[in-house]
Image (cartoon, rainbow, N blue to C red):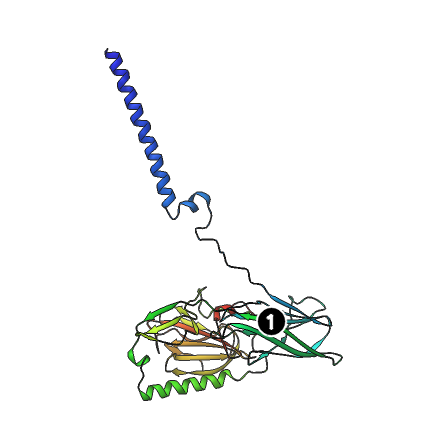
Amino acid sequence: MGSLKKSELFLKQRIILRRSSVAATLLVAIVCATSPNASSAQTKKPAHKSSTATPVKPANVDCGGGVELRVSAASPAQGTLLIAEVRSAKTLADIAGKFTDRDISFWQAAGANIPKGTNVWRALLGVDLEQAAGDYNLNVTGKSADGSALACEAPIAVRVGKFPTERLKVAPNFVEPNPEQAAKAAEDQKKLRALYATATPEKLWTGPFRIPLDGVKTGGNFGKRRVLNGKSNSPHSGVDLPSPTGTPVHAAQSGRVVLAEELYFAGNTVIIDHGFGIYTLYGHFSEIHAKVGDEVKVGDVIGKVGATGRVTGPHLHWGLEVDRARVNAMEIVGKQ
C-alpha cells in the first residue's frame, strides 16, 4: 500500500509539472505575439509596415521626328516636384514650356548620366500646393538644328494632396495683427510675389541640392492645414526642420541672395535665387549671415536657427518655389 501511494503521488506530480510546462509555453507564445518587437527579434526583419503605395507612373510622349517628352509622374499630387525632359538624337534649341499659367524654363543637360548621342533638355516642374485637382497639359515648344519647329504636350492629372490639419496656439498678434502689423505683412507678401515672378534666365547651381541642416534627413508639416488660435489659416507652404537655436543653416545650393531681412510672419529670412525660377526660402533665423547680392555656394552658412516671427519653438522653415509654384522642399534634395 505504501508503494502504491508513492506511485500515485509521483504520477500526480508529473501531471502538475506537465500542465505548468504547457501553461508556460502558452504564456511565452502570447507575450511574443503581442510584443511589438517580437517579429523582428525572431525573423530579423524590419519592424515597420510594408508600403502599399501605388508606384509612380511617368508620362512618356512620342513627339514625332525622334523626339520624346518625359515627365517623372503622370498623376502627381498637389505640392509635388516633377522632372520634365525632352530627348532627341538630333540637336535641339530654344526649348520652352508652359504649364497652367506658368512659363517653364528648360536647360540643356550635360554630364555622365546623359546617354551618348542624346540631346537632353531638362526642367523642374512644380505642382502648386493649392493647384486645383484636374487634367492639365505640359506644352513644350522648340526647334531642331534644321530650323523645323517642335511642338509637343504631355497630359498631367493633378491629384488632391493628403494633408492633415493641426491646431496651434500662437501669439494673438500673428492671428489678428493690428493695422500697422497687417500693413507690414501685406508689404512682405507683395515683395515676395515680385521676387518669385522673376525667373533668372540661367542655371546658377551645379550638382545636387542638399538639406540646409547638417545631420538632418527628414522634415515635416508641408501642406498642413492649420487652425491658429481657433481660426483657419492658409496651408503651411514650407518644411519645418526642428533644431536648437544657434544651429548653422547652410545654403541648399549655389545661387544669389535676393532677400535677407525680417519678415512679419517668417521672422529673419533669407531667400536664394538658384536661376530658372527656382528659389529657396529659409525662415525664423536668430541671426542672418548673408546680405542681398551675395553669391553663395552650396553649404555656405547663411544664418542660424531661431524662433523669430510666427513660431511655437525654434526651427528652420525651409520653402521652395519653382516657377511660382509652392512645392515640398524635401523633393528637391538630390536633384541637379
**Extreme residue toward the top, this view:** 1
- Mark 1 lies on a secondary structure that is strand
Indicate whether 301 appears above or below 113. Answer: below
Residue at the image position 33 percent from the left and 27 percent from the top = 18
Is residue 87 visible to the viewer in this orientation of the structure? yes
Horizontal relation, residue 306 to residue 199: left or right: left
Q: Nearer the viewer, residue 174 or 115?
A: 174
In the rendered structure, which amino acid carries the disc numbered 1? Pro
Q: Position of residue 272 (x, y in %)?
A: 49, 79
Horizontal relation, residue 127 to residue 318: left or right: right
Residue at the image position 47 percent from the left and 48 percent from the top = 45
Q: Position of residue 256 (x, y in %)?
A: 51, 81
**Extreme residue toward the left, this view:** 2
Indicate whether 182 appears above or below 4. Answer: below
Is residue 243 visible to the viewer in this orientation of the structure? no
**How many numbered circles are shown?**
1
Q: Quadrant of residue 119?
A: bottom right
Q: Quadrant of the C terminus?
A: bottom right
Mark 1: give few (<14), some (14-19) or many (20+) Cα within 10 Å: some
**Extreme residue toward the right, this view:** 146
Q: Position of residue 279 (x, y in %)?
A: 50, 78
Q: Nearer the viewer, residue 45 or 230?
A: 230
Horizontal relation, residue 277 to residue 228: left or right: right
Horizontal relation, residue 65 to residue 77: left or right: right
Q: Position of residue 112 (x, y in %)?
A: 65, 66
Residue at the image position 41 percent from the left and 68 percent from the top = 221
Q: Quadrant of the N terminus?
A: top left
Read off the residue under disc 1.
155
